[in-house]
Image: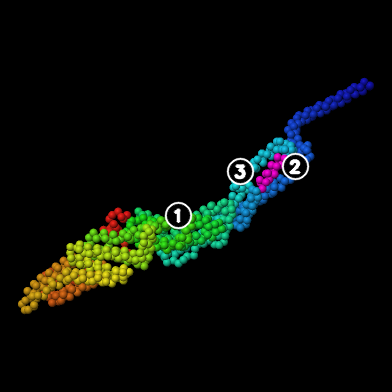
């Protein structure tokens, strides 16, 4: 029994020992696992010890150093906090500034101004905050308050800020400060500036080009006042941000296009004509008249409006800016093209008609002189000024040169043969009408002004009556040419016909004119008398001889004498018809350009021949009319004869056109070459 109890105790002891051992093993295993995890933690703690040491170092620093560092920190925190606060404010403006300025331009500009003020504050205070932070680092380093690695990181950050402050200033700095917000806002303002101009720039309405010269003054195509105020407000902000040049570029581009659109209705293709594209000045005579009207319209309406508008929009920016802006618009819109056309005319070949065209162009420019000086007188319009000055010089030199050569050109024509038709040479009709125009109301004052200027350039004097004196010399040279030409005719009848023609032309076309008044009544009367004399001699020596062929001698009718009388009538009618046919054939190509003279001469011829012929046929016609061969002797009825004689000397169409007519250049050259045969004429 006792032995059994002992065994049980030993078993229980073994079980307890086993449990204890198992428990110890589990604890040992747990401790082993814990020890395995503790190793890395010790490594981590070891790595953090320097930081912990740096963190607690101020605690180990001197009490005085710790007290002093508080003041440095307080001084740096204020500016730094203010800078950070403004940075937050800048970000708060982003939504407004990325919206469309069109919706609320004044509000948008106000927000942009706040942004500019914020950036200005940042630009001025970032440096101060950096300086205070640098002072703290320096103090910490000097008093060994902070860890070296920590101080190194602070120094590195501050060096980056300082480099940005010192080297990244200007636009780059501001862009970095606001993240490009201001640049985006300014771009939107430029786009709004363009939109306002484009939407409100409308081509100037006008009447048809044909009635342009009669058109009354048109109200300038100004922008609405509200739009101008908006443009000025935008310019103010963009100018403050150095964006003015871009605005000017936009303004010039759009307003130049607007002026060009207004000019398109005028059909200005002729402005592109080159010297080689027209044969003579007459071929572009109509364009020159248009040019004057179009130039006046462009200057007084289009460019005048742009001048005023530039002043209104840019007046707050300064005179130089808006004058420069206007000059660019004028140049790009076509002002130089107008001047170039005038220069093209001056570069064309010289002829007398060109003188009048040069005077027309000079008159147009002179009429606009005050407008030119006001609109294009500034330093910004120097290109237009130089071009205009050069054009005026060419006009004056060219006009003066042609005028002073007229006398020589007329004298040279003596060498040419007179017209075979006995008419008025183109030279005579041209020069008389031409000189009347030069002395007329339209050209006299302009030509006098041109010659006066030309003489003054050469330091020569121009007498008040010098123009008239020179014109009278030209007319008297024509007289001398007539004398030479009359002597050149081998046929004296044709010479007298020519003299009658031309003396009457001079008398008629100069009587009642300024030239005629200067020449005097005696001079005019002399030419009228010459006309009468040559007309009398011409009729006497030609048509006046025909009636003698219808003699009544030997035609006394008596019983049994009809056969003899009939033979005489036949013979005399045949002689008359042959003489008439020969005379008509000879003079059928002759011309009397002046209708009044032609009618008078034809009437005198009719009066000299027809009554005699009528009476003769009434008395002796019956003797031959019953004859079978009567048609051989009675070729003309009285009516037919009168009709033939009344239709003599009619010029062919356009053969002798007026000065306003346009004759082919070759014909003008062949009939009347008013240009020198030497190299004096281009």
Residue under pointer 1: 383
**SS at circle 3:** helix
Q: Are marks 3 and 1 in contact (CB under 8 Å)?
A: no
**SS at circle 2:** helix
The disc label shown at residue 255, or none: none
Secondary structure of the magenta portion, mostly? helix
Residue furthest to the right: 2
Mark 3 is surrounded, within 10 Å at the Cα level, by few (under 14), some (14 to 19) or many (20 or more) other residues, namely few
Residue 594 locus on image (x, y percent) = 26, 68
**Residue 245 lies in the magenta-colored region:** no
Which sits in the foreground, 4 or 63? 63
Q: Is residue 297 above or below residue 25?
A: below
Relative horizontal placement of residue 238, taking residue 378 as reference (left or right): right
Residue furthest to the left: 560
Which segment did they paint magenta? 125-139
Q: Which residue appears at 73% of the width and 44% of the height?
A: 72
Disc nearer the start of the sequence (3/1): 3
Residue 270, quarter of picture: bottom left
Relative horizontal placement of residue 277, taking residue 653 as reference (left or right): right
Residue 34 locus on image (x, y percent) = 78, 30
Q: Is residue 229 visible?
A: yes
The disc label shown at residue 167, or none: 3
Residue under pointer 2: 69
């Amino acid at each position: 029994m006792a032995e059994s109890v002992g065994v049980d105790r030993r078993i229980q002891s073994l079980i307890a020992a086993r449990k204890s051992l198992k428990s110890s093993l589990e604890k040992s295993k747990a401790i082993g696992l814990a020890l395995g995890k503790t190793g890395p933690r010790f490594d981590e703690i070891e790595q953090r010890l320097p930081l912990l040491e740096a963190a607690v170092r101020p605690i180990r620093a001197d009490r005085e150093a710790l007290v002093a560092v508080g003041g440095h920190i307080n001084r740096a925190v204020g500016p730094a906090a203010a800078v950070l606060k403004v940075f937050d404010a800048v970000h708060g403006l982003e939504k407004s500034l990325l919206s469309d300025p069109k919706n609320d331009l004044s509000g948008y500009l106000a927000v942009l101004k706040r942004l500019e003020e914020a950036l200005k504050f940042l630009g001025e205070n970032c440096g101060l905050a950096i300086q205070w932070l640098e002072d703290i680092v320096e103090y910490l380093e000097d008093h060994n308050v902070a860890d070296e690695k920590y101080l190194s990181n602070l120094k590195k950050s501050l060096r980056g800020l300082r480099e940005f402050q010192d080297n990244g200033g200007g636009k780059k700095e501001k862009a970095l400060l606001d993240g490009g917000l201001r640049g985006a806002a300014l771009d939107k303002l430029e786009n709004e500036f363009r939109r306002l101009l484009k939407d409100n720039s409308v081509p100037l309405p006008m009447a048809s080009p044909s009635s342009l010269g009669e058109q009354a003054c048109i109200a300038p195509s100004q922008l609405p006042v509200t739009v101008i105020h908006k443009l000025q407000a935008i310019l103010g902000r963009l100018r403050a941000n150095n964006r003015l040049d871009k605005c000017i570029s936009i303004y010039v581009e759009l307003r130049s296009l607007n002026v060009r659109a207004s000019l398109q209705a005028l059909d200005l293709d002729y402005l592109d004509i080159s010297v080689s594209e027209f044969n003579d000045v007459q071929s572009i005579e109509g364009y020159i008249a248009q040019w004057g009207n179009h130039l006046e319209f462009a200057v007084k309406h289009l460019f005048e409006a742009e001048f005023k508008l530039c002043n209104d929009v840019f007046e707050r920016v300064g005179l130089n800016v808006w004058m420069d802006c206007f000059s660019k618009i004028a140049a790009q819109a076509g002002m130089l093209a107008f001047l170039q056309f005038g220069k093209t005319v001056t570069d064309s070949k010289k002829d007398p008609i060109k003188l009048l065209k040069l005077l027309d162009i000079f008159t147009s420019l002179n009429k606009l002189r005050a407008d030119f000086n006001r609109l294009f007188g500034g330093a910004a319009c120097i290109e237009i000024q130089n071009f205009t000055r050069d054009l005026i010089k060419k006009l004056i030199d060219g006009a003066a040169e042609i005028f002073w050569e007229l006398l020589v050109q007329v004298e040279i024509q003596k060498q040419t043969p007179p017209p075979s038709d006995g008419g008025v040479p183109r030279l005579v009709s041209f020069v008389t009408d031409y000189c009347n125009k030069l002395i007329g109301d339209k050209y006299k004052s302009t030509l006098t002004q041109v010659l006066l200027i030309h003489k003054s350039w050469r330091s020569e004097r121009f007498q008040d009556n010098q123009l008239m004196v020179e014109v009278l010399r030209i007319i008297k040279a024509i007289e001398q040419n007539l004398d030479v030409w009359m002597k050149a005719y081998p046929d004296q009848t044709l010479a007298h016909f020519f003299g009658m023609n031309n003396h009457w032309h001079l008398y008629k076309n100069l009587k009642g004119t300024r030239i005629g008044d200067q020449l005097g009544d005696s001079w005019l009367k002399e030419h009228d008398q010459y006309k009468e004399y040559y007309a009398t001699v011409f009729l006497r020596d030609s048509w006046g001889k025909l009636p003698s062929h219808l003699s009544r001698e030997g035609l006394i009718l008596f019983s049994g004498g009809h056969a003899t009388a009939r033979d005489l009538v036949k013979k005399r009618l045949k002689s008359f018809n042959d003489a008439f046919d020969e005379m008509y054939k000879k003079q059928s190509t002759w011309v009397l350009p002046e209708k009044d003279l032609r009618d008078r001469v034809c009437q005198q011829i009719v009066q000299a021949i027809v009554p005699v012929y009528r009476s003769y046929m009434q008395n002796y016609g019956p003797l031959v009319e019953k004859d079978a061969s009567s048609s051989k002797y009675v070729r003309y009825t009285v009516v037919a004869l009168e009709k033939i004689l009344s239709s003599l000397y009619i010029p062919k169409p356009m053969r002798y056109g007026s000065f306003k007519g346009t004759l082919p250049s070759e014909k003008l050259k062949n009939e009347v070459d008013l240009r020198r045969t030497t190299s004096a004429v281009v």
